Amino acid sequence: FFNIGGNPSELMAFMVKNPGLIPKFQTVKEGEIGRRREQMAEMFEGFWRACVNTTDDEHDKHNLKLMGDKHPFIAHAIIANPPSMAHIHIAERLGIPLHMMFTFPYSPTQAFSHPVANIKPGKSNVDESYINFMSYALVEMMTFSGLGDLLNAFRTKTLGLEPVSPLWAPGALYRMKVPYTYMWSPALVPKPKDWGPEIDIGGFVFLDLGSKFTPPDDLKAFLDTGDPPVYIGFGSIVIDDPDRFTQMIFKATKMAGVRALVNKGWGGLGGEDNDTPDHIYMLGNTPHDWLFPRVKAVVHHGGAGTTAIGLKLAKPTMIVPFFGDQPFWGAMVAEAKAGAFECIPYKKLNAERLAEGIEQCLTEEAQINVQKLADSIAREGDGAENAVKSFHRSLPLKGAKTMRCSILEDRVAVWKMRNSPFRLSALAAELLVEGGKIRWEDLKLFRVYEWADFDGPGEPITGGAHAITSSLYDIGGGVGMVPMRIAKHVKKREEHEKKKRAVATRRPERIQRKQAKAAAAKKAADAEPMSDSSGCAKRPDNPRQETATTVGSALSADPTAPLADEIKDDVGTGFKASGTALLTMPLDLHMAVAQGFHNAPRLYGDATVRKPIRITGVKTGWRAARKEFTHGVYDGFTGLVTQPVGGWKEEDTLPAKFSGLGKGVAKGVGGLVLKNITAIVAPPAFLATGVRKYVEKRLGGPGTDGYIRKVHIIQGVKDLQTLDDDEHATKLHETRQAVEEGWKVYDELWKEVHHFRNAAGRGPLGRIKKARETKQWEEDGVLTNVSATEKALEARRRGEDLKVLFERRREALRKEADEARAPTLEQQPQLATEEKTADAPQDTTAVEEAGTARNPLALGDGTSRDDAAQVNRTREGSESTAVASESSSQTKGAAAAMPDHVEGAGAKGGVAEFMAPEHGRDEEARVA
């Protein structure tokens, strides 16, 4: 567990008061919006620390500085829910896989609207499917309009990334086809037809809490003394008037003629328990998986977890939604007729409607329908296991862009050899450095994905204007906000002193009240008989929380720094911010204009605009500048021919062809002007941006490349220390041997490259030929791991035609990518023992591909398995293999679904294909 900050209770109370997208005026008036924004900004920082920090204890300076005994941590992948918002930005910064998992839909579809949008069906003459689809964009736009400035501040100040446009940020995950796994039953909500293979539905997920629960005696007595009761509870919902709501529940259950278990929850239902009717039992915290089998129907708020366990146990359900996804689940359950016929919101609920809903839950129709859902949920299997399988398949564990270490394939690669596709884990790099084979300077951080989706402004005019206004705002905001910050500190201290005086005044009165209350309670306890006339034991009191406000009343500690020091820090921070903005203003303007000219041809439909290179330092800045110049000139002049020809070929009829030809000529002329301007304007901006990024990275601090490099170096040392004892002596020897043998293979590869370079010549043509062949090997995955590289080297020495090998592998990858991936719940695990065809090499690769999936990233074992008997594994090994070795027809469609702008995407790299440990040692066998 890593504490990211925030207050769940306050957030829950805020959501109950403001169930829609737009907060109420009273909420704005009370200043709640500002407090929620402050908490979200705090949580953004917490999300980032959770991905890069060793500990969440900010006072543990020893471990925070990587000097303690705790193992350092940098995330290799992120699993997040959509509302956390910081996920894609952190994944972009670290260059790691991102997988979204959630309990209600956030992916645009025409089948149903976004649950938070609260769209009323039939209230518009616009096509319902269009409204449904656009509701997702509406929710993201509204969310970004309220938190976008905080996100951009987080990107620029904490992550060191460029800010994103409010017009571009909404829908980014949808455009980039980020993998999703939704945790609900497809029997209740089937997967929409317009969702791609990157989206899975894995089934409900449950926790086993009931087996460890011991019920109190009075609860057992209540359950045993009559008919099974109805459960009524609203979990963590905080209600404004719990006493009135409690009396309404009492009245409704009496009207329906049922006994009931009423959960007190966070809302504090039941008051002091003094006037509870005999047919009601006020519950404390009780696991649903223990309780629900003992009831005959359930009434709740529609939380995803409570809905799931009720349907799993075949309990007719009535949902009283408050906010968020609860109306969505209420509508789905009502549509399935698995309980109450109607989903009644909390604001419209009364005793009569609650009693009617309970009676509907007890009908035979509801019992039959909910039993059908329960049977389907049982057949779907373990939702958590399905979610894990979905996550594993989305990881790039195969192909040229795999995240596996090239030598120790059961470990994640964190390093990459400069000017080489050779990838190393922390342990492998430590062993090679220790052996004197490489230096740390030879390695750079390995980035699995480049998630950047924002290419800058769409044209130079608005881009330049936005850059100027942003810079002026930052310049003025730095110095201009100093008086406000000082006033805020002074006011905060005054309020603190005022609270201290008030607390000191009220303390004696509070002590007297507590003493009087304790004396009265003792007197009542002495006078109370051991049992009442009904024979029921006394029910526990309810320590109900105060719900009138969501603002905490605890007195904070005294300020540690003098006011003069705070003022000095405010002045220094303000002038520093203004000075930095002033210095970077010319570069920001230059960069915006350059990006605007680069993207401008898209305005008139030029599809040949190239994706810009991500600039992370001086080298990438120089490469981006060089390519922008050469591509700008080349595309500008060749477009005079290619654009008209393309316009002619795209059309079918002769008039349309001439029209396309004319449009192509116009596009070619426009490209000749704009792309050549870009070739002149952009290179200096890109190179200067690279220098700026280099300086920022060298400043240090969590999240900078220097810090991340230090973490990975320490991780390698600690991994080696873990193996350096008597218990792991054999494993350490095998690991050292594997690293040494792997290094020999790559050393031979570099010798072969040197030999080829000499044979090809040292001139420009020789360098081009060498670079082309090296790129060919890399793209076709020949350099993916030690075994594949070794086999390719042997084939080259024997004089075999490598083009045949490359073409076989490309064709196999293309076929696999074209095959649709079966949904998670339809996939049956099996061992990868493909039959070999006549033209496939007769080796043991097909057996080697079986693999395992032992660690959390399912990277397998990595040791050689040349014995065909390896297929006959133990039961434990077979079960772990089942996840890792899905057949190609079930796992390869995601590769085609990955977006082109995500580095490593597409069939060539196979980034979304699941890979067993040796899956790739000799990929020719995959042709079968």
Image (cartoon, rainbow, N blue to C red):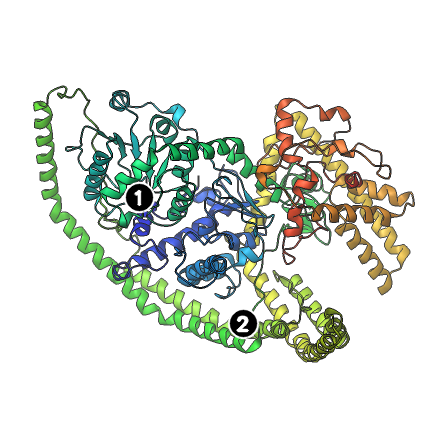
Residue 730 in which image quadrant? top right
Tell me: residue 655, above or below residue 743.
below
Q: Would residue 693 appear left or right of 399 to someone viewing this image?
A: left
Proximity of marks 2 and 1: CB atoms separated by less than 8 Å: no
Q: Which residue is at the far right?
A: 799
- Residue ID for mark 2: 588
- Residue ID for mark 1: 237
Could you tell me residue 383's position as x and y percent? 51, 35
Residue sitting at x 47%, y 70%:
581
Which image quarter holds the C terminus?
A: top right
- Cα–Cα gap, marks 2 and 1: 47 Å
Residue 726 in which image quadrant? top right
Which image quarter holds the N terminus?
A: top left
Residue 703 makes an appearance in the image:
no
Amino acid on which disc 2 is placed: Asp
Tell me: residue 293, above or below residue 757.
above
Q: Secondary structure at mark 2?
A: helix
Q: Would residue 88 appear left or right of 676 to someone viewing this image?
A: left
Residue 26 makes an appearance in the image:
yes
